[in-house]
Image: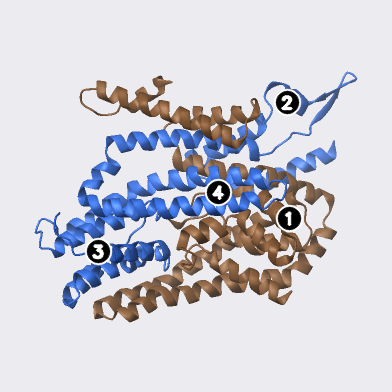
Amino acid sequence: MAEKILDKKTLTKSYHKWMMYNLVAMSFEFLEAMGFALSMEPIADKLYSDEPEKKKEMMERHTAFYNTEPQVGALINGISAGLEEQKALGNTGITGELINSLKIGLMGPLAGIGDSMVPGMLIPILLSIGMGLSSNGSILGVLFYIVAYNCIMYFGSRYLFFKGYELGAESVDVFTGEKAQQITKAITVLGMTVIGGVAASYVKLEIPAKFALTGTEIDIQAILDGIFPKLAPLMVIFFSWYLMAKKNVSPVKLIMIYFVVAFAGVGLAYLF
Amino acid sequence: MLLQAIAISVFCYLGALSTPWLLGLTGGWYTITRPLVSGMIVGLILGDLKQGILIGVAIQTVYIAMVTPGGQMPADLNFVAFPAIALAMLSNASTEVAVTLATTIGVLGTIVFNLYQVVNSFWNHRAVAAIQEGDYRKFRLNAIAGPQATNFISRFVPSFLVVYFGSGFAKSMLDSMPQYLIDVMSYLGGVLPAIGIAMLLTAVVKENSLFLFFLLGFVCIVFLNLNMIALTIIAAVIAYLYYTGSSKKSVVMSNGVIDEEDDEEEF
């Protein structure tokens, strides 16, 4: 990879276009395809400045259906830029089909890694810290979240984009190989532990049932607090997970079920 | 009130999932549409910063772990973050009631979002046709300007209507609501975060042994009373040990294939 056509300015422009426009025209039919094409436009301009037919062919290639976690997925844009450059330089091993099948092959795994790392781990951690700092109405936690999240994402995605460009097709192994899978799993472990803490902090349910039995009053919540405080919220979470993961109940349906249960539960409490 | 409603609705548009102007997803959807941040913005606009942040923190708890795989969402967080928080502040709702109010608006908002995606199919086909004609100006027009005009209308108009006309209605509705309904809403407000967490578990958990780590984090907060920073550090140490443990084993295994079953015995 000695020869280069793309300079840093063009690549940075492509990266910025992707970060801005990744979901710009999202539809069920194309999802992020238009965003991908927009991010490839500066690359196509540079590679085929005086070959409009080839530019058109490249742009058409990148309007195919595309969907991944956009921020971690910046890696794929970098890889595509690198491969398009090699193709323009006349490397016959790299065809349009290869580039497209690489994109399709990578978008699934990276969506999985990206979703579990960004909204699944990074965001809950940063939000929890921010909410802790702002729980008294202070502005500090809000500012912490804004600065921390945007810095991590802007520079992190930028790193992935340029890494993808440098490594080209090799990066497929680097980022989906065995070692990468172990790292992803370790990060999932981190995320799960933190989410457990988030669940304990923010899900609230107390059972107000009290029974008068042979003169002494039995308060169910007080008994639970002595054994395992927060047992009821934990049960609710597992029950919700079971319905969603095993019974395919949609989240909206679950909200409605909870509404009915709360309605009936409070009604019962009023009766006694 | 007119200017405030306009300002809130403009922010609502800026924070929508597909608005590009604040570095796209990163600065919009994942920053100003987090209720923690939008609470501050709405609070500033309505002149009560502290109350805005407090409501923002309360509503953020419901959506702390929400993932939107493939653009599918159970609640339109953008409508939660702006019109719903504004409505809650203007009607002086308690934080628990605000949570339920916001969730209801969020669920209704998904209809608007799905409609938006359907309309975008129209723009997408025109954009692809423009590339086939080799007209890149027309391509950008149909890939950026068209969808964003649609996006602006679908965000600004509902948000403005809710904030401008809904606040008086919401206040009188909450004032006349019986204690029974307010109790129901308070309970729901406490339980709804469970749905966001369960969604995340559904998306992330591929093997049941991961629930052990979830339980560990839960217990650290309930019994050890750790704060979030301490828990994150502990979680990072465990993740590191997990990583070194699993990479040592894969060296031992000659064929290099990771046996998923064995991972549970590491701990």
- The residue carrying mark 2 is A225
Foreground: disc 1 or disc 3: 3
Badges 1 and 3: C-beta atoms under 8 Å apart? no
Q: Which residue is mark 3?
A: A7
Reading the image, the residue beneath label 4 is A251
Residue depicted at 41% across the width and 68% down the height: A25
Which residue in the protein does label 1 denote? B50
What is the spatial separation of the Cα atoms under label 4 and label 1, in whole angstroms? 31 Å
> Are the residues flagged by discs 2 and 4 from a single subunit?
yes
Task: Please name the color used to draw chain B.
Answer: brown
The chain letter corresponding to blue is A
| Residue at horizontal 40 percent and vertical 47 percent from the top | A114
Front of the two marks 4 and 1? 1
Residue A208, given in percent of the width and then of the height, sits at: 78, 34
- As measured in the structure, the alpha-carbon distance from the residue carrying label 1 to the one carrying label 3 is 48 Å
Among the two numbered marks 3 and 4 on one chain, the one whose residue lies closer to the N terminus: 3
What is the spatial separation of the Cα atoms under label 1 and label 2, in whole angstroms?
33 Å
| Viewer-proximal residue among A79 and B139 | A79
Label 2 to label 4: alpha-carbon separation: 29 Å
Residue B208 in view = no
Q: Position of residue A227 (x, y in %)?
A: 69, 21
Residues under labels 3 and 4: Cα distance? Answer: 47 Å
Q: Amino acid at mark 3?
A: Asp
Do the residues marked 1 and 3 share a common chain?
no
**Residue type for callout 2:** Asp
Pick the quarter of the image with the C terminus of chain B. top left
Across and down, in percent, residue B9 comes to: 62, 70
| Mark toward the start of the polypeptide (3 vs 2) | 3
